[in-house]
Amino acid sequence: MKIGILGGAFNPPHIGHLVLAQEALDKLNLDKIFFIPTNISPHKDNNIVDGLMRLEMLRLATADNKYFNCLDIEIRRLGPSYTIDTIRELKRAYPDDEFFLIIGSDLANSFSTWKDFQQIKKQVKIVAALRKDYPLLDPADFIPIEITHLEISSSKIRDLIYNNSSARYLLRDEVLSYIKEHNLYSEVK
């Protein structure tokens, strides 16, 4: 099987994540996409909702797509989430499958700062989803794909909720209901 890996904080998971995953699935003829929420991101501010809650929001967001699976391997591992550790674990669990790490071109441009980035390049194919504000600086190491550009970010959604504004249509309804039910993002910006 050909499996896409889409990691991130997913704080919260939004429509942009789903569009990216679906377009990567279609354009690369993948069999599945594994969504893997980080436990602690070494690259981002870690003022995020608990990992299990983010995993549950991902499950709600992806429940109606049989090609999307949510994995808790980084949350179970605890500590900082390094992509190389996740790839090694996936390769042990799925030794006969081919993996495609899906990242945005913004992350691709700083890929050489990732832990063991040379090992990552040897073990998986790396897909760079092109973002209009971040042209791919070194395309040789990546499979570039054009994606539908949506001006959506998790931080924008958190700001909307914190400011008591509507985030409707930026998230799946099930995710928005979960956020409201658990009073997420309304007290901490």
Image: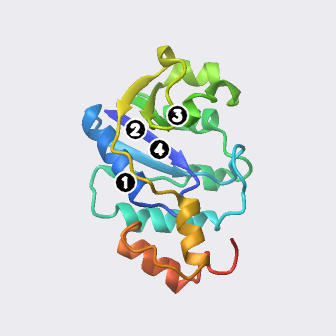
Mark 4 and mark 2 residues within 8 Å of each other at the beta carbon: yes
4 up-or-down from 51: above or below: above
Front in this rendered view, residue 64 or 149:
149
Distance Cα–Cα, label 3 vs label 2: 22 Å
Let me know if residue 11 appears in the view. no
Say which residue label 4 marks. Answer: 6
Distance Cα–Cα, label 1 vs label 4: 10 Å
Say which residue label 3 marks. Answer: 134
Say which residue label 2 marks. Answer: 4
Say which residue label 1 marks. Answer: 18
In what element is the residue under mark 4?
Answer: strand
Front in this rendered view, residue 78 or 130:
130
The numbered dot on residue 64 is: none
Distance Cα–Cα, label 4 vs label 2: 6 Å
- Which image quadrant is residue 52 in? bottom right
Residue type at tag 4: Leu
Mark 3 and mark 2 residues within 8 Å of each other at the beta carbon: no
Distance Cα–Cα, label 4 vs label 3: 19 Å
Residue type at tag 3: Tyr
